[in-house]
């Protein structure tokens, strides 16, 4: 029986996350979630089980509510880099989840790198 799109996505997400966990044990994870309308990102400390910082296009002060384009993704990437510095995070690893590393996800990663995050 064929797997649904959602099941294939979940398998891909777990495969990516498990490979990253093996290599980057003890580091903070930069987790990305993308939908058709918005993009959000979180800095997660898996050891403590807490979220250190987050940013999303759903925040009204960013001015991109309901937009998931390259410009909005780049803005979210630069905001998470600022918030990471405020939280004392210099290095993390990039968890793209089940999403391909192109388009908005790539723009977010590039903007976060330019903002000073190392991954």
Image (cartoon, grey):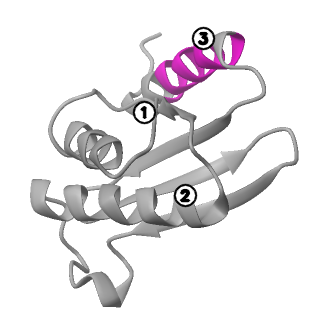
Are the residues flagged by discs 1 and 3 in contact, CB closer than 8 Å?
no
Gap in Å between the C-alphas at discs 3 and 2? 23 Å
Q: Is 11 in the magenta? A: yes
Task: Name the spot of residue 21 as percent of width and height, x first.
Answer: 68, 19
For label 1, the SS is: loop
Q: Quadrant of residue 56?
A: bottom left
Label 1 crowding class (10 Å Cα cut-off): few <14, some 14-19, many 20+?
A: many
Q: Main secondary structure of the magenta part?
A: helix
Task: Name the spot of residue 87 as percent of width and height, x first.
Answer: 65, 62
Sequence order check: which comes first, mark 2 or mark 1? 2
For label 2, the residue is 84
Residue that appears at 50% across and 32% down:
95
Q: Residue furthest bottom?
A: 61
Residue that appears at 59% across and 17% down:
20
Residue that appears at 54% across and 59% down:
85
Gap in Å between the C-alphas at discs 1 and 3? 12 Å
Q: Residue furthest right?
A: 48
For label 3, the residue is 19
For label 3, the SS is: helix
Which residues fall within the magenta stretch? 10-22
Q: On the rendered structure, is 35 left or right of 48? A: left
Q: Is 54 in the magenta? A: no
- In the image, 86 versus 21, the foreground residue is 86
For label 1, the residue is 96
For label 2, the SS is: helix
Residue that appears at 12% across and 53% down:
70
Q: Quadrant of residue 5?
A: top left
Label 3 crowding class (10 Å Cα cut-off): few <14, some 14-19, many 20+?
A: few
Gap in Å between the C-alphas at discs 2 and 1? 17 Å
Are the residues flagged by discs 3 and 2 in contact, CB closer than 8 Å?
no
- In the image, 26 versus 86, the foreground residue is 86
Task: Name the spot of residue 100 as percent of width and height, x first.
Answer: 28, 27
């Amino acid at each position: 029986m064929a797997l649904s799109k959602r099941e294939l996505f979940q398998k891909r997400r777990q495969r990516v996350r498990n490979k990253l966990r093996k290599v980057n044990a003890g580091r903070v994870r930069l987790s990305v979630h993308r939908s058709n309308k918005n993009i959000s990102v979180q800095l997660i400390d898996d050891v403590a089980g807490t979220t250190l910082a987050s940013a999303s296009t759903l925040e009204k002060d960013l001015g991109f509510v309901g937009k998931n384009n390259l410009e909005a993704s780049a803005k979210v990437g630069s905001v998470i880099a600022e918030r990471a510095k405020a939280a004392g995070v210099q290095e993390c690893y990039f968890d793209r989840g089940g999403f391909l590393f192109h388009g908005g996800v790539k723009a977010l990663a590039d903007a976060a790198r330019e903002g000073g995050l190392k991954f």
